[in-house]
Amino acid sequence: MDTTDALADLTPVAPPKTRSRSRRRSIGVLIVLVLAILALLSQGLLHSLNYFETVNQVFAGRASVGTKVIRLEGVVKPGSIERTSSGATFTLTGSKNEAVHVAAHGSPPQLFQANIPVVVVGHFTSATSLDFDGTQIMVKHSSSYIAAHPKRVKAPNGSTR
Protein backbone atom coordinates (compact mmCIF):
# COMPACT_ATOMS: atom_id res chain seq x y z
CA MET A 1 0.00 0.00 0.00
CA ASP A 2 1.08 3.48 -0.80
CA THR A 3 1.64 5.90 2.08
CA THR A 4 -0.39 8.56 0.38
CA ASP A 5 -3.42 6.30 0.47
CA ALA A 6 -3.04 5.83 4.20
CA LEU A 7 -2.83 9.57 4.79
CA ALA A 8 -5.83 10.46 2.71
CA ASP A 9 -8.73 9.22 4.79
CA LEU A 10 -11.87 9.56 2.74
CA THR A 11 -14.40 8.62 5.38
CA PRO A 12 -17.12 11.22 5.77
CA VAL A 13 -16.69 13.61 8.63
CA ALA A 14 -19.71 14.82 10.62
CA PRO A 15 -20.29 18.55 10.27
CA PRO A 16 -19.53 20.66 13.34
CA LYS A 17 -22.39 21.07 15.80
CA THR A 18 -24.46 24.16 15.21
CA ARG A 19 -24.64 26.61 18.02
CA SER A 20 -28.40 26.51 18.31
CA ARG A 21 -28.17 26.34 22.09
CA SER A 22 -26.14 29.54 22.31
CA ARG A 23 -28.39 31.16 19.70
CA ARG A 24 -31.47 30.32 21.79
CA ARG A 25 -29.74 31.68 24.87
CA SER A 26 -28.94 34.95 23.05
CA ILE A 27 -32.51 35.31 21.83
CA GLY A 28 -33.78 34.64 25.36
CA VAL A 29 -31.48 37.30 26.81
CA LEU A 30 -32.62 39.80 24.16
CA ILE A 31 -36.29 39.10 24.93
CA VAL A 32 -35.69 39.59 28.66
CA LEU A 33 -33.86 42.88 28.00
CA VAL A 34 -36.63 44.17 25.73
CA LEU A 35 -39.27 43.27 28.32
CA ALA A 36 -37.28 44.95 31.09
CA ILE A 37 -36.88 48.13 29.02
CA LEU A 38 -40.60 48.16 28.18
CA ALA A 39 -41.51 47.69 31.85
CA LEU A 40 -39.23 50.56 32.92
CA LEU A 41 -40.59 52.86 30.21
CA SER A 42 -44.21 52.09 31.06
CA GLN A 43 -43.63 52.69 34.77
CA GLY A 44 -41.85 55.94 34.03
CA LEU A 45 -44.70 57.13 31.85
CA LEU A 46 -47.35 56.12 34.38
CA HIS A 47 -45.59 57.93 37.21
CA SER A 48 -45.04 61.06 35.16
CA LEU A 49 -48.76 61.57 34.59
CA ASN A 50 -50.28 64.00 37.04
CA TYR A 51 -53.98 63.58 37.60
CA PHE A 52 -56.16 65.79 39.75
CA GLU A 53 -59.19 65.18 41.89
CA THR A 54 -62.16 67.52 41.51
CA VAL A 55 -63.98 68.92 44.53
CA ASN A 56 -66.94 66.67 43.60
CA GLN A 57 -64.74 63.56 43.51
CA VAL A 58 -63.24 64.42 46.90
CA PHE A 59 -66.69 64.78 48.45
CA ALA A 60 -67.77 61.45 46.93
CA GLY A 61 -64.75 59.58 48.32
CA ARG A 62 -63.43 61.72 51.17
CA ALA A 63 -62.33 58.74 53.29
CA SER A 64 -60.11 57.34 50.54
CA VAL A 65 -58.27 60.66 50.08
CA GLY A 66 -57.30 61.05 53.74
CA THR A 67 -54.29 63.33 54.16
CA LYS A 68 -52.23 62.18 51.18
CA VAL A 69 -50.87 64.81 48.78
CA ILE A 70 -53.21 65.33 45.83
CA ARG A 71 -53.98 67.87 43.14
CA LEU A 72 -57.39 69.38 43.91
CA GLU A 73 -59.32 71.08 41.10
CA GLY A 74 -62.18 73.50 41.55
CA VAL A 75 -63.42 77.01 40.82
CA VAL A 76 -62.36 79.88 43.10
CA LYS A 77 -65.45 81.19 44.89
CA PRO A 78 -66.02 84.93 44.36
CA GLY A 79 -65.30 87.04 47.44
CA SER A 80 -63.40 84.27 49.21
CA ILE A 81 -59.82 85.29 48.33
CA GLU A 82 -57.82 86.76 51.20
CA ARG A 83 -54.12 87.53 50.81
CA THR A 84 -52.00 86.45 53.77
CA SER A 85 -48.35 86.91 54.70
CA SER A 86 -47.65 83.32 53.62
CA GLY A 87 -49.83 83.25 50.47
CA ALA A 88 -53.61 83.27 50.22
CA THR A 89 -56.74 81.64 51.55
CA PHE A 90 -59.79 81.00 49.41
CA THR A 91 -62.65 78.58 48.81
CA LEU A 92 -62.79 76.07 45.97
CA THR A 93 -66.24 75.03 44.82
CA GLY A 94 -67.53 72.08 42.82
CA SER A 95 -70.45 71.84 40.45
CA LYS A 96 -72.81 70.64 43.21
CA ASN A 97 -72.10 73.56 45.61
CA GLU A 98 -69.52 71.61 47.59
CA ALA A 99 -66.80 73.82 49.07
CA VAL A 100 -63.28 73.26 50.35
CA HIS A 101 -61.37 75.94 52.28
CA VAL A 102 -57.80 76.29 50.98
CA ALA A 103 -54.85 77.86 52.79
CA ALA A 104 -52.14 78.14 50.13
CA HIS A 105 -48.53 78.90 50.96
CA GLY A 106 -46.41 80.82 48.47
CA SER A 107 -47.29 83.43 45.90
CA PRO A 108 -50.39 82.73 43.84
CA PRO A 109 -49.86 82.94 40.07
CA GLN A 110 -50.47 86.24 38.32
CA LEU A 111 -53.67 85.00 36.63
CA PHE A 112 -55.15 83.80 39.95
CA GLN A 113 -58.56 85.39 40.59
CA ALA A 114 -62.16 84.56 41.49
CA ASN A 115 -64.39 82.53 39.15
CA ILE A 116 -61.57 80.66 37.43
CA PRO A 117 -60.70 76.96 37.57
CA VAL A 118 -57.48 76.22 39.46
CA VAL A 119 -55.56 73.16 40.59
CA VAL A 120 -54.00 73.26 44.06
CA VAL A 121 -51.30 70.79 45.12
CA GLY A 122 -51.46 69.88 48.81
CA HIS A 123 -53.28 67.77 51.39
CA PHE A 124 -56.21 67.92 53.78
CA THR A 125 -55.25 68.88 57.33
CA SER A 126 -56.93 65.75 58.75
CA ALA A 127 -58.71 62.66 57.44
CA THR A 128 -62.16 64.23 57.97
CA SER A 129 -61.42 67.95 57.56
CA LEU A 130 -62.45 70.07 54.60
CA ASP A 131 -59.48 72.42 55.18
CA PHE A 132 -56.89 71.95 52.46
CA ASP A 133 -53.25 72.96 52.98
CA GLY A 134 -51.88 73.93 49.56
CA THR A 135 -48.27 74.30 48.49
CA GLN A 136 -48.81 75.32 44.87
CA ILE A 137 -51.64 76.98 42.91
CA MET A 138 -51.90 76.45 39.18
CA VAL A 139 -54.35 78.34 37.00
CA LYS A 140 -55.99 75.61 35.00
CA HIS A 141 -56.44 77.47 31.69
CA SER A 142 -54.78 80.56 30.37
CA SER A 143 -56.82 83.36 28.84
CA SER A 144 -55.51 82.44 25.37
CA TYR A 145 -56.80 78.87 25.78
CA ILE A 146 -60.20 80.07 26.89
CA ALA A 147 -60.36 82.59 24.03
CA ALA A 148 -59.58 79.81 21.56
CA HIS A 149 -62.12 77.41 23.16
CA PRO A 150 -64.84 79.57 24.75
CA LYS A 151 -67.38 76.77 25.20
CA ARG A 152 -65.02 74.41 27.04
CA VAL A 153 -64.39 76.41 30.23
CA LYS A 154 -67.07 78.40 32.00
CA ALA A 155 -67.29 79.85 35.48
CA PRO A 156 -70.26 78.84 37.66
CA ASN A 157 -72.00 82.12 36.84
CA GLY A 158 -71.84 81.24 33.11
CA SER A 159 -69.15 83.75 32.19
CA THR A 160 -66.04 82.75 30.34
CA ARG A 161 -62.58 84.04 31.13
Image: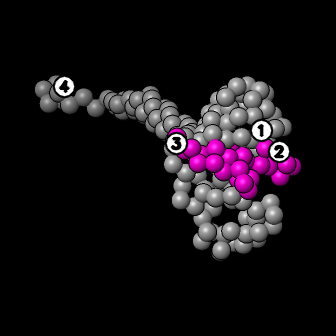
Label 2 or label 1, whichever lies nearer to me, is: 2
Q: Which residue is mark 1?
A: 58
Q: Nearer the viewer, mark 2 or mark 4?
A: 2
Looking at the rendered structure, the number of numbered marks drawn on it comes to 4
Discs 4/1, front = 1
Question: How far, Cα to Cα, is label 2 from label 1?
Answer: 10 Å
Asked if residue 50 can be seen in this view, the reply is no
Q: Secondary structure at mark 1?
A: helix
Give the extent of the magenta segment: 71-99
Q: How crowded is the residue under tag 3: few (<14 C-alpha within 10 Å), some, or many (20+)?
A: few
Mark 3 — residue? 85
What distance separates the C-alpha of mark 2 from that of mark 4?
103 Å
Task: Check the image and report above or below for 2 versus 89.
Answer: above
Tell me which corner region of the image, top left, top right, bottom left or bottom right, holds residue 12: top left
Q: Position of residue 58 (x, y in %)?
A: 77, 38
The residue shown at (66%, 51%) is 81
Q: Secondary structure at mark 3?
A: loop
Mark 3 or mark 4, which has the lower sequence index?
A: 4
| Screen quadrant of the N terminus | top left
* Horizontal side, residue 120 vs residue 152: left or right: left
